[in-house]
Image (cartoon, rainbow, N blue to C red):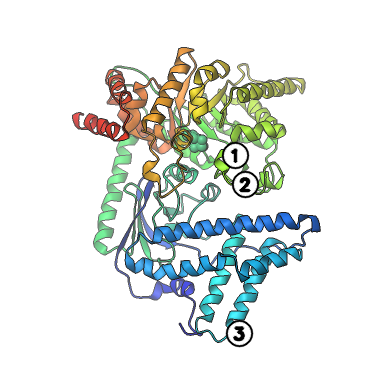
Amino acid sequence: MKPTEKPRVAVRSRAAAAPKRAERRLVGIPVAPGIGIGPLFATSEARPEVPRLTVAAEAVEAEVARLDVAVRASRKQLGKLRERLAALPDDISTELDPLMEAYQRMLAPGRLLRGAHKRVEARQNAEAAISDEAEALAAAFLAGTDQAAARHAEEVREVARRIVRNLTHTPFRSFAGAPEGSVLLAEWLRPSDAALLDPAKLVGVATEEGGADGHTAVMLRALGVPAVLGAAGLTGSVRPGALAIVDGSDGVVILDPTPATITQARRRIAEHAGELKKLSRLRGLPAVTTDHVPIELQANLELPVELKLVARSGAAGIGLLRSEFIFMNRDDLPDEDTQAELYRSVIAAMDGDPVTIRVLDWGGEKEIEALEQEGLVPAVAGDNPALGLRGIRLLLRQPELFETQLAAILRAANAGPTRVLLPMVTALSEVREAREVYERVIRRLRRRGETLPAIIPPLGIMIETPAAALSADAMALESDFFAIGTNDLSMYTLAIDRGETDLTQLYDPLHPAVLRLIQFATEAALRVRKPVSVCGEMASNPRWTKLLLGLGIRSLSMNAASIPRVKQAIRALSMDECIRFARRVMELADPAHIAREFEDFEREE
Ligand code: PEP
Ligand code: MG
């Protein structure tokens, strides 16, 4: 490439005027059903802000560590992208691989990182240090005689931007400018990015990274936007503005579709709409089996915009309100009044149907900047965040945060039946300690003269760790109800990250180890007559309903859009056959045999 030529990234982003490319199909993980057709929106030009500060002498070491963490994260992201590129058709991988290699070279110990370290040691903050060093390097490239100077200059700047994004937790894409009817394309989305999406604007979402039951997938399903995650080769090789089809039912992204493919997709959109209309007729019908066993079907809620969907779904209340959204995408923590008002509005909207509010489940991939800014959580996560300070562990360590939320829930509970749910429990002592805090808050509110509901909201626990499931008999005596979280339960039992793209076929909630834990916990609750529900993604799959019912589950909570399909499944099943089916499945120890048992059942139906 001659020095006067544009760098490759820019060429690609301006390629809208280039000749039309052949249709390409990229396979990913289907995470939110439906099909969307629209122009791609990929804001690869968005630049993260570079803050400029003078670092105090005693903070230099921590600043260097912060820079190193961001560099490690950047290396990991690029390593993963490159690995996945290797599996793509030659024309795409040959085009992108040299670029990835160049980025990785710049992230290896060398001039860029050495220079940035020196700048931090001279008390520049990490963001400014890496950006300035990259600029200095780019200038040096451009001043030389190397034919590829312009390309190298753009590469080093791009690497610095990636590091700054990781330092500042800036999303890799800015979504604000997404035009109406577009398909959002991103390398990856954090749950907090997904929380900012406007489902009315987007017809589809496609990303390169992400797993089937990661929190981003959960959010996208909740928003009801057709979505495919983990589609390798998406970013970098697309032309912004080009037409794309996202098939969130089959997990396919089609770039530059031919007219015939578009016609076919339009037909499927119409079929899907027809099916939804048919399902909506189930709304007023009860969720009962053919032998008249009533099943409670509730909705999970992660964003206030979903309340409308919940109302349309015929949900009998909210079985899991993930309160994280209240804390995300803001600079400060919501105070007691703000939280009470939010909870009250949800409880009132449910009009007498129960609402289960899960207290803050921070940790793992759920980033909440306000908590970092208030110094309540470490700015630099440990090497293994999913195994670190999560859920109830953080709340017990930060009693003020916990007490504020409990007080807000208790006040809001005057508006209707409410339950309080504790996340990520692993030990009995956590339940006991949490109950002590709960009772302390109740006493304090009474002293303050607050009116509390006649029935104090029951305090239950998530069964989402093998430790909680295996101690379920003791846990059932100390807690008022169980909500089985099959997402984390599968992740921790199978030792597979739920958000991991490449191991997604090993993330199997039907693995006998997971099923046995569900069975053990369910039976432990039922023995002492404590309510038990399933609120993980497993609850939303109508194929799996028969198994959960057969194991004794009578309450399911899921994304609102799945309720009609699950209701349809329940109305076609008898409890008798569910119990017989579950017995057969629970005798099997091989996941492949379990899968076959499901197929046999469906064939006989
Ligand atoms: C779960 O782990 O199954 C669950 C419902 O909680 P979350 O998905 O919010 O981690
Ligand atoms: Mg969980």
Please give the residue where the numbered disc 3 appears in the rendered image.
143
Against 142, residue 588 (above or below) is above
Query: Decide: marks 3, 2 in contact (CB < 8 A)?
Result: no
Instruction: Find residue 140 and report its image quarter.
Output: bottom right
Mark nearer the N terminus (2 vs 1):
2
Q: Quadrant of residue 262?
A: bottom left
Q: Which residue is mark 1?
A: 388
Q: Is residue 550 above or below residue 593?
A: above
Residue 326, x across and y down, in percent: 60, 40
Q: Label 1 amino acid?
A: Gly
Q: Quadrant of residue 510?
A: top left
Label of residue 381 in the image? 2
Q: Amino acid at mark 3?
A: Ala
Structural crowding at the residue carrying mark 1, measured as other residues with C-alpha within 10 Å and reported as few (<14), some (14–19) or many (≥20): some
What amino acid does circle 2 point to?
Ala
Position of the N terminus, as image quadrant, is bottom left
Q: Work out which residue is located at the far front of the displayed protein and give it.
A: 109
Tell me if label 2 and label 1 are in contact, CB under 8 Å: yes
